[in-house]
Image (spheres, rainbow, N blue to C red):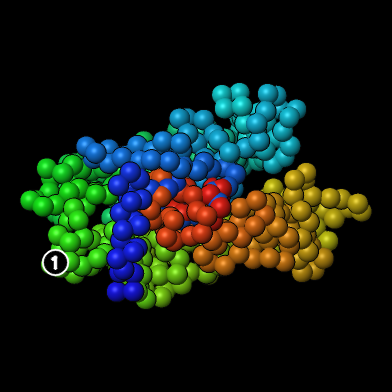
Amino acid sequence: MAMNSYAKCLLLGLVALPALVGLGACGSSPNTTPLSVDGGGPGGSVATGGASTAGGGTSATGGTSATGGTSVTGGTGVTVGGVPTGGNTCTTSGDCTPPRGYCHSGSATCVECLASANCGDGRVCQLGPQTCVQSCTSSTDCSGAASACDTSSGICVECTGDTDCDGTRSVCNASQQCVQCLATSDCEGATPACETTSQTCVECLTNPDCGDGLVCDSGQCICENCSDCGGAQCDVAFETCTDASCECRGGTELCRDQCSDTQNDPKNCGVCDEKCGKMEICTAGDCVCRPGLDLCDADCFDFQSDADHCGDCTTVCGDGGRCDGGQCLSGDAGAECSEGLTACGAGGGKTHCVNVATSNAHCGRCDRECSEERVCVEGECRKYKPAAPCIACPCTAVCDELVNDAGCCEGPNGNPICVERGICP
């Protein structure tokens, strides 16, 4: 295999001993299948520094651990310990500007809302991430990744119980996200143990779970040294030795001489070489709309800014009108988009009011789209990759190989990703 070389194995061995932690047991720090993002970004946190898997646990120093997954919507900060992070720091709301115009005292960061009164009609404030989301009275009001209605809060979520989950993620956690497990009783077969930090079923938690000559690494039983597998020199970040040959670690498969996470890789989604569209991500092997976008027919649109799909799939703003915050506004002379948004032209003299700092369709400027393997962070299209086989940040060894100058972030579906320049989206 092209990845196998003595020099690479020796180098990764030096990196991996102190740093391998899961997207399971890897090295650098996207919120539970790993993606690699070069540079990290606002609205997230980068974990750098050592990580240990002894005893099956995963600890990250110098970063923020992601537990249970955090919902990410269109560039809003993530939630850590029950409070949002990633916005500008503040002491009062006077320090904040739209679309994050309110100061959250618990985290001292600017957020989109403190209460539902801060959101427009038909929207409520989701506590934790402090973002305005579509309200609901039943699941018929919900769609996409958040297809279940939590009637107690009036918010669309991924799940309200295990019956809303299926496939490889069949358990609903406390954050109302579908995960693989909450306890070992949820796991079976080749992955009988639950790694509770990432809420993922794994082969092992500690060395005694493995046979003679094997150690537990990133939730997998592997040869302690490459030479123990008949002399093969494997890329230890992605491969394990099996019957004297190097094979991709669990959760990945070989695509064009590289081990790829086909459940989360937008360039190999479901199967090798199956690409998602620019406005899509890969989740559970299927291409779905990116966070903050909704599906209309076969395309994904931002209901908050798209003048031809303003608030829903069918609402088209009139000639000269603009879509601002999901509402069509008239094109009065001198009218401008809300503070923090940029006016981008649409057909019929209409205007999209866009946050170019986070929009993958208008990143940094109105005419720039990010490709399927890039995400808009601070107005720049930055490369990202799933951090598999690592299952929890910081995933240093994996991210260092996948993306230049990468940091580990929690991805939109809760799995770790490597992002260029370490700033989380």
Quadrant holding the N terminus: bottom left
At label 1, counting other C-alpha atoms closer than 10 Å, the crowd grade (few under 14, some 14-19, many 20 or more) is few
Residues 223 and 218: in front is 223
Look at the picture and state if 153 lies above or below 311. Answer: above
Marks counted in the figure total: 1
Residue at the image position 35 percent from the left and 41 percent from the top: 51
At label 1, the amino acid type is Gly
Q: Residue at x 51, y 33 (%)?
A: 128
Residue 264 visible in image? yes
Q: Residue farthest to the right?
A: 333
On screen, residue 149 versus residue 372, left or right, reads: left
Estimate the x, y position of residue 265 in percent, counting from the top left. Answer: 42, 64
Residue 372 rendering spot, x and y as whole percentages? 53, 66
> 149 or 335, which is in the foreground?
335
**As drawn, is 205 to the left or to the right of 89?**
left
The residue at 48%/60% (across/down) is 403
* Tag 1 residue: 230
Q: Nearer the viewer, residue 179 or 257?
A: 257
Q: Is residue 23 visible?
A: no
